[in-house]
Image: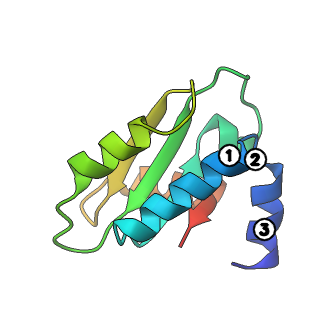
Amino acid sequence: MGLQEVVKLLAVDLDDKLIRSIRELGKKYSVKKIVLFGSRARGDNRSTSDIDLAVYTLPNFTSEGTLLSKLDDLNTLLKIDVIFIAPDNDHHLIEKIEKEGVVLYE
């Protein structure tokens, strides 16, 4: 993780324990990358804003349901919205995530 990514991560309005839990799930389920995007990544969120996560997976990833369930079980009252990124996803959306997103796990 480079300096720019660290600076972005420090500005994110999320509890450190929650970020650590998301990272642990990324490692446990062998995903390529988890990126926070949307209002929390841009810094224009409200205290009740949801958490938008883009999960980049390896080919033949089969644990979507389990990972979604584990993310749902995290200790937060905030809604967590997850999209799984695959090569056939909307390229405009991927570009937006890459531009504004904050890498939580890689």
When the figure is inspected, residue 1 is found, relative to residue 28, above or below; the finding is below
Q: In the depicted view, which residue is nearer to us: 32 or 86?
A: 32
Q: Is residue 32 visible?
A: yes
The residue sitting at 55% across, 53% down in the picture is 21
- Residue 75 picture location, percent across and down: 55, 35
Q: Nearer the viewer, mark 3 or mark 1?
A: 3
- State yes or no: discs 2 and 1 in contact (Cβ < 8 Å): yes
* Residue placed under numbered mark 2 in the picture: 12
| Colour scheme shown | rainbow
State the separation of the CA atoms marked 3 and 1: 13 Å
Of pointers 2 and 1, the one earlier in the residue sequence: 2
> In the picture, which quadrant includes the N terminus?
bottom right
Q: Which mark is residue 102?
A: none
Q: Residue furthest bottom?
A: 2
- State yes or no: discs 3 and 1 in contact (Cβ < 8 Å): no
- Name the secondary structure under disc 3: helix
- Residue 89 picture location, percent across and down: 29, 55
Give the residue type that dot 2 points to.
Answer: Val
* Residue placed under numbered mark 1 in the picture: 41
- Name the secondary structure under disc 1: helix
When the figure is inspected, residue 99 is found, relative to residue 39, above or below; the finding is below
The reply, left or right, for residue 33 in relation to residue 57 is right
- Residue 78 picture location, percent across and down: 56, 26
- Residue 69 picture location, percent across and down: 31, 41
